[in-house]
Image: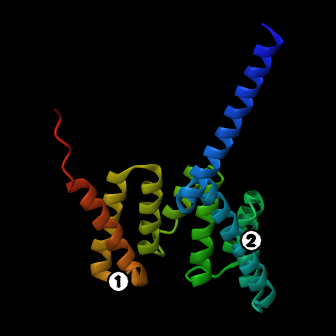
């Protein structure tokens, strides 16, 4: 290969790489609100806002048990899931059973297990709530099954939750959300398969 050919090839490669970079910039610009890079930056901004809000709440909270709840949640938000799990477990054990704090701490503990890739412990945490909090227990189980992709189990649990709610009102303020989830499962089930050609 001659020197002249080498120079032409280098110029061609340089031109091609410049074109590739320009194309990437144009594509990123044109799809900015809905692309992976924008999503990443939006997620980071949201996470930083959550951290600031939790730090403010910890500083403003006068109830020591509530402060511990937000401290565990802050650890979860920062990605320290082991610390979050320890905090939620300890607080759940200290909170009075039947209290709103006991319930919300148990639910956050389940979520922390899920984020820590411990689905069996997450589900067990929700099932353990069944006797005292049947509505929230079943609703949490249903969302767990939906995240796992098991729509049939989610549908079954939601049907049980809604049936019991009619008898005792156990879903409380979450009734609308449970109905919304159940309707979404019904509409997906009723969607006909596209005909094969």
Give me the disc on residue 122.
none
Q: Is residue 145 left or right of residue 86?
A: left
Tag in front: 1 or 2: 2
Q: Tell me if residue 68 can be seen.
A: no
What is the distance, in whole Å, between disc 1 and disc 2 at their CAs?
A: 32 Å
Q: Tell me if residue 148 can be seen.
A: yes
Q: Is residue 151 left or right of residue 90?
A: left
Observer-nearest of 137 and 191: 191
Residue 1 lies, in percent from the top left, at 78, 7
Crowd class of label 1 (few under 14; some 14 to 19; many from 20; radius 10 Å): some
- Residue at (55% x, 63% y) in the render: 33
- Residue at (74% x, 32% y) in the render: 14
Observer-nearest of 34 and 10: 10
Quadrant of res 7: top right
Q: Is residue 154 left or right of residue 44?
A: left
Task: Look at mark 1 in the image and give the residue it sits on.
Answer: 169
Pick whichever of labels 1 and 2 is earlier in the sequence: 2
Would you place residue 185 above or below residue 195 in this image?
A: below
Q: Residue furthest top?
A: 1
- Residue at (18% x, 49% y) in the render: 192
Q: Residue furthest front?
A: 4
Which quarter of the rendering shows the C terminus?
Answer: top left
- Marks counted in the figure total 2
Task: Look at mark 2 in the image and give the residue it sits on.
Answer: 74
| Element carrying mark 1 | loop
Residue 40 lies, in percent from the top left, at 65, 57
Residue 150 lies, in percent from the top left, at 39, 49
| Element carrying mark 2 | helix
- Residue at (67% x, 32% y) in the render: 16
């Amino acid at each position: 290969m001659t020197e002249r050919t080498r120079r032409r090839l280098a110029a061609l490669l340089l031109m091609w790489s410049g074109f590739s970079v320009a194309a990437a910039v144009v594509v990123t610009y044109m799809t900015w609100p809905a692309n992976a890079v924008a999503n990443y930056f939006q997620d980071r901004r949201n996470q930083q806002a959550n951290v600031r809000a939790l730090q403010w709440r910890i500083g403003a909270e006068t109830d020591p048990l509530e402060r511990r709840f937000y401290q565990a949640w802050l650890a979860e938000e920062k990605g320290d899931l082991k610390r979050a799990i320890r905090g939620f477990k300890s607080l759940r054990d200290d909170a009075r059973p039947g209290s709103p704090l006991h319930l919300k701490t148990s639910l956050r503990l389940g979520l922390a297990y899920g984020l820590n890739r411990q689905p069996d412990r997450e589900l067990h945490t929700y099932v353990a709530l069944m006797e005292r909090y049947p509505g929230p227990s079943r609703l949490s189980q249903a969302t767990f099954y939906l995240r796992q992709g098991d729509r049939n189990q989610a549908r079954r649990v939601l049907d049980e939750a809604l049936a019991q709610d009619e008898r005792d009102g156990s879903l409380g303020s979450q009734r609308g959300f449970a109905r919304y989830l159940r309707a979404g499962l019904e509409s997906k089930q009723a969607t006909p398969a596209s005909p094969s050609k």
